[in-house]
Amino acid sequence: MSASTVSRAASPLRPRLLGRSVVNLVVLVSVLYTLLPVLWLVLASTKNRDALFSSDILSLSDFSFVQNMKDLFAMDGGLFGRWYGNSLLYAVLGAALGALISVACGYAFDKYRFAHKEKLFGLVLAAVMVPQTVLALPLYLMASSAGLVNTFWAVFIPVLFNPFGVYLGRIFSQGYVPDEVLEAARMDGAGELAAYFRVALRMLGPGLVTVFLFQLTAIWNNFFLPMVMLSDQDLYPVSLGLYSWNSAASVSPEYYPVVIMGSLLAVLPLILAFAMLQRFWRSGLTAGAVK
Amino acid sequence: MTSTAPVSVPADATARPSPRSPAAPAPEARRSARRRELVACGVLMTPFFVLLVTVFLIPVATAVRLSFFSDDQPGLGFGPERTVFAGLRNYTAVLADPTFLGGLGVVALYCLVYIPLMVIGALVLALLLDSGVVRMRGTVQLALFLPHAVPGIIAALIWLYLYTPGISPVIDLLGRADLTVDFLGVHMVLPSIVNIALWSNLGYNMVVFYAALQAVPREVIEASVVDGAGPVRTALQVKAPLVRSSIVMVAMFTLIFALQLFTEPMLLSQSTPMINSRFSPSMYIYDAAFTRNNYGLAAAASVILLLCTIALSYGVTRWTNRSNAAEEGAR
């Protein structure tokens, strides 16, 4: 043991410097791998159709960012603006409501005792792994018999369901809400629900934001369910709308710059959300991983 | 209805009974307190469980039920359709369908390539970041995480354009070096899909591993350095085993989502004949249900996909538990 300590201390500086640069090089290449496609999207959004197909991506000679933006919102009678609004509605409202529902349930799993608790929790966990494609057809048939196919609700109600949020809610409740605090609230004569809404919910705030963010991402990304449920283009979210425009692009290439510009705009909200709420999702990931 | 990727979480996170024992007041007061607790518990849980029943349990039950029925058209397709009990006929039809088996094969191959690449790649990056020699760690993490904020369909779109000759600067550059690669050709189409998935999720899983590594007590690492382990050995033999539960979790979620492969091939299929409408089991289900309107067939394929998912997840858990036990035993 001591021999190797000595040999390590005596090891020449050069290999370690080499190791350092190799490590930094590997990390740099990975960063380029993740960044360059996004950078390409930004550059491509400044090109008109001809420049997109012919010129060098880095040349700024055919700068038509503004024109592309105008085209995007004018295309097909301003459909894109509608899609964007729909996506915001599905995602922000759905994630807010969904996070409240899941965290409340996770909290109850943590703080209360009742029969078959762990079995029920197992059922919640099992729901995480069931493929969405398995649920899509039955959901479609149910929505169809309820007259909800091709309405806002057909997409909105299923996305509220977030079993993973319950799991996180339980962990956050364990970590952030000490039983003593609830006991104190009860001593002060607060009812159980008042204790949750006035005391516990505030302490669960960061966890709630984390669950919200995960669900926001999931709903913003949602593609399969809207594709199954919606046929009215006015109800499409951005993901499905761009998919349909992209399929049109192979026949009519004037859609290409529009799809690229639309993709760029579709990326922005989540980047903004992650940048603004960095503190929360980082702590959320850590809370999940550290325990 | 989520496609959230995993946050790494401990296997035993739920094993704590919640202590609830006030200093023994009068029995009837305690009983009414208990009742109030149960009512509150019910109120907090009801919204979620209403959703669980309506958008999860009933649909799963419906899928299973549908898989045993089929639509019969008596009299050469004239006359009213009847739904008749079909026994296992839908299952035999699906399992005898070469396009479905082909789809299973595609997904199996995809998993075999994608999951090891993802887990090892994310872990190596996290270990490198944790080694302390990387500069600008915060910025690097954010940059690697960025693709997670790009919706799956947009990621597929970006890469589709990067795979399209004429638009793609990548193909242009390769062309200047006299290399022609057809990213959407018969041999490259699966690696191309793996690349899209890898690009989307690598950074996210790296952050999960990195968070777990940060939680490893520094004394453990210092001890291994004192023992003379170099940085590489410390990383592989000390740190990596300590974040085992995160590794299993990431592998499991990656597997579950990989089995559902749909979005990327669906988008690429708009541009390449190499991807047909039944390329993966999920695309097969979509095609059977909404193009061919054969609900029984789609339901049977769904149940088979579900069973595969359950079996594989169970296998992973069992295998982990066993090797955990073996490790415990070895100590």
Image (spheres, rainbow, N blue to C red):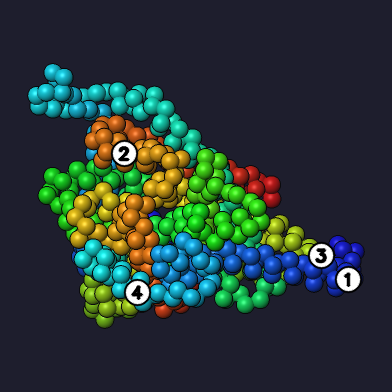
Say which residue label 3 marks: B228
Nearer to us: label 3 or label 4 = 4
In the rendered structure, the residue with mark 2 lies on which chain? Answer: B
- Apparent side of residue B294 relative to residue B311 in the rendered image (left or right): left
Q: CA distance from mark 1 to mark 2?
A: 63 Å
Amino acid type assigned to the residue bearing label 2 in the image: Asp
Which circle marks residue A12 in the picture? 1
Tell if the residue under mark 3 belongs to the same chain as the one under mark 4. no
Q: CA distance from mark 3 to mark 4?
A: 63 Å
Q: CA distance from mark 3 to mark 1?
A: 15 Å
- Apparent side of residue A203 relative to residue B290 in the rendered image (left or right): right
Q: Is residue A46 visible?
A: yes
Nearer to us: label 2 or label 3 = 2
Q: Secondary structure at mark 1?
A: loop
Say which residue label 4 marks: A67
Which circle marks residue B220 in the picture? none
Instruction: Give the total of numbered labels.
Output: 4
Nearer to us: label 1 or label 4 = 4
Nearer to us: label 1 or label 2 = 2
Amino acid type assigned to the residue bearing label 3 in the image: Gly
Amino acid type assigned to the residue bearing label 1 in the image: Pro
In the rendered structure, the residue with mark 3 lies on which chain? Answer: B
Amino acid type assigned to the residue bearing label 4 in the image: Gln
Tell if the residue under mark 4 belongs to the same chain as the one under mark 2. no
**Viewer-proximal residue among B124 and B231:** B124
Tell if the residue under mark 1 belongs to the same chain as the one under mark 2. no
Vertical order, B244 against B316 (above or below): below
